[in-house]
Amino acid sequence: EAGVAQSPRYKIIEKRQSVAFWCNPISGHATLYWYQQILGQGPKLLIQFQNNGVVDDSQLPKDRFSAERLKGVDSTLKIQPAKLEDSAVYLCASSLVGGGLAGDDNEQFFGPGTRLTVL
Amino acid sequence: GQQVMQIPQYQHVQEGEDFTTYCNSSTTLSNIQWYKQRPGGHPVFLIQLVKSGEVKKQKRLTFQFGEAKKNSSLHITATQTTDVGTYFCAGLRSSNYQLIWGAGTKLIIKP
């Protein structure tokens, strides 16, 4: 079974520039997550999609970050304009289901991440 | 800010010693998941605990979920070099089903 795919793996940009990340979840997984992981910290959930609807985007800085999952499959996360503090690894994860269900299908499968450096 | 506290931040052990990390939530959790992240890697799911007081074992790893569903622990018996990494808990809040991650505990094996 193919895992979660992300691209690019690395990106270096200057502050105030724009950047976009792409994620293709595991086939059949309804829930897709975007996380920001700053070095030495735990993942911080930015946005969670259930199919193509947003479940939780309470921690997404909406003035500069946007995300979409138009057909309920792959997703893009955009930052415009980038700031120095956006330097982090952006992780995409997917799960078969999600939300409040207590079953094993909540397991999240992570992609390799995109390491963003903002200069 | 995050509302799942995880301690300690780091733990240095000799190979063969035990390791424990603790997670405490200010609110009741619907369930809690544990993940392991190797240096330079991404988080990998270890286990999910759902029931109050639940205890699960995976070989040398023992996971517990507190009676009040507000805390959890991971204990590794007789650590090996392959155990090196950062262990994260992630709790699903009962109130709004938001998944909150702890800051992780980094397991370091002393040379």
Image (cartoon, rainbow, N blue to C red):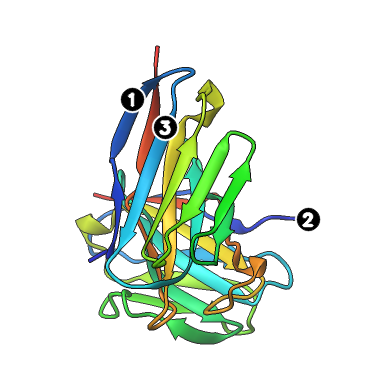
Q: Position of residue A62 (x, y in %)?
A: 29, 80
Q: Is residue A86 visible?
A: yes
- The residue wearing badge 1 is B12
Q: Position of residue B25 (x, y in %)?
A: 31, 64
In which quadrant will I find the C terminus of chain B? top left
Who is closer to the viewer here, B91 or B63?
Answer: B63
The answer to the question of whether label 2 and label 3 lie on touching residues, with beta carbons closer than 8 A, is no
* Chain ID of residue with mark 2: A
Q: Residue at x 64, y 77 (%)?
A: A30
Q: Residue at x 38, y 26 (%)?
A: B108
- Residue type (three-letter) at the residue carrying disc 2: Glu
- Residue type (three-letter) at the residue carrying disc 1: His
Give the secondary structure at mark 2: loop
Q: Quadrant of residue A31?
A: bottom right
Q: Is residue A110 visible?
A: no
Q: Residue furthest bottom?
A: A53
How far apart marks 1 and 3 lie (CA) works out to 9 Å
In which quadrant will I find the N terminus of chain B? bottom left
Q: Quadrant of residue B4?
A: bottom left
- The residue wearing badge 3 is B19
Q: Is residue A59 left or right of residue A109?
A: left
Q: What number is the disc on residue A1?
A: 2
Q: Nearer the viewer, mark 1 or mark 3?
A: 3
- Residue type (three-letter) at the residue carrying disc 3: Phe
Q: Is residue B81 above or below residue B54?
A: above
